Amino acid sequence: MRRLEQKIAIVTGAGRGIGAAIARRFATEGARVVIAELDPEQGQQTATAIAAETGAETLFVHTDISDAASVAAMHAATVAHFGPVDVLVNNAGIAVFRTPLETSDDDWDRCMNVDLKGAWTCTKAVLPDMVTKQNGAVINIISNHAFAIIKGTFPYPVAKHGLLGLTRSLALEYADQGIAVNAISPGYTDTQIAEDDFRATGDAARARAKVEAMQPVGRLCQPDEIAAVAALLASEEARFMIGENIVMDGGVTIRMYDDIRALD
């Protein structure tokens, strides 16, 4: 099935991990895909690899989503190369984990400028294209930090809660103009970033096993699983889904107390 035939899609942070998986899936579904990535080497490699693997048209554009001028240039390059945008995936983000009183102004600004304001800047750039077409899809890759809190991860959850609010607000504003704005909230996902974190402990296998044991399904989410849901949300089949946040965390956030029976 090629549900995205000839659609023009931008995926931010698509050089690797979840973003690369989404870009690859979109390409297999027939989309022409823009890899909007901060790392120029990784971004170009991914764009070239996806084109070779799928035969799809791809374009790498060096993009810093925290810089409005960079986003405007990315959008202009997309329109010049492919045409007006049909689908935007706001995937790029950073993890800033502190305790509240250890959080500097720079920490706060860096987190908000990428994880929240950056998503809005990209969305604002493409919305006129979608309004003109009276059709489009915006997909925000959030996190279960958008509705559940882990101590010591401030201010990341603040930005993610904001991104969920942005998703819902824009969804209602543009639902009557054929634009579907939705979100996906992945849990612990098997990416290079996760692997780097495991290795940083000094015993990657033990760290991975510990995290996997915390998952009700006994494993980490795979980027391709998130990409499959993103492809649905980007398609015409999901246009009646408005302002939804699809949680993909293997059941972590519906679980209460693992050891409740020990209290009997």
Image: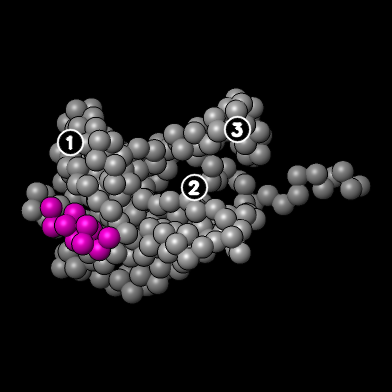
Disc number placed over residue 56 in the picture, else none: 1
The label nearer to you, 3 versus 2, is: 3
Image location of residue 217, percent across then percent down? 61, 36
Please tell me whether the stretch drawn in magenta is mainly helix, strand or loop. Answer: helix
* 135 with respect to 84 (left or right): right
Can you tell which quarter of the image residue 122 is in? bottom left
Q: Please tell me which residue lies in front, 48 or 66.
A: 66
**Contact check, label 3 and label 2, Cβ < 8 Å:** no
Image location of residue 154, percent across then percent down? 56, 59
Q: Which residue is denoted by mark 3 in the rendering?
A: 201
Residue at 25% across / 36% down in the picture? Answer: 41
Write the start and end of the magenta stretch as one range.
67-77
Q: Amino acid at mark 3?
A: Thr
Image location of residue 178, percent across then percent down? 26, 66
Q: Secondary structure at mark 2?
A: strand
Label 3 CA crowd tier, 10 Å (few <14, some 14–19, many 20+): few
Q: Which residue is denoted by mark 2 in the rendering?
A: 186
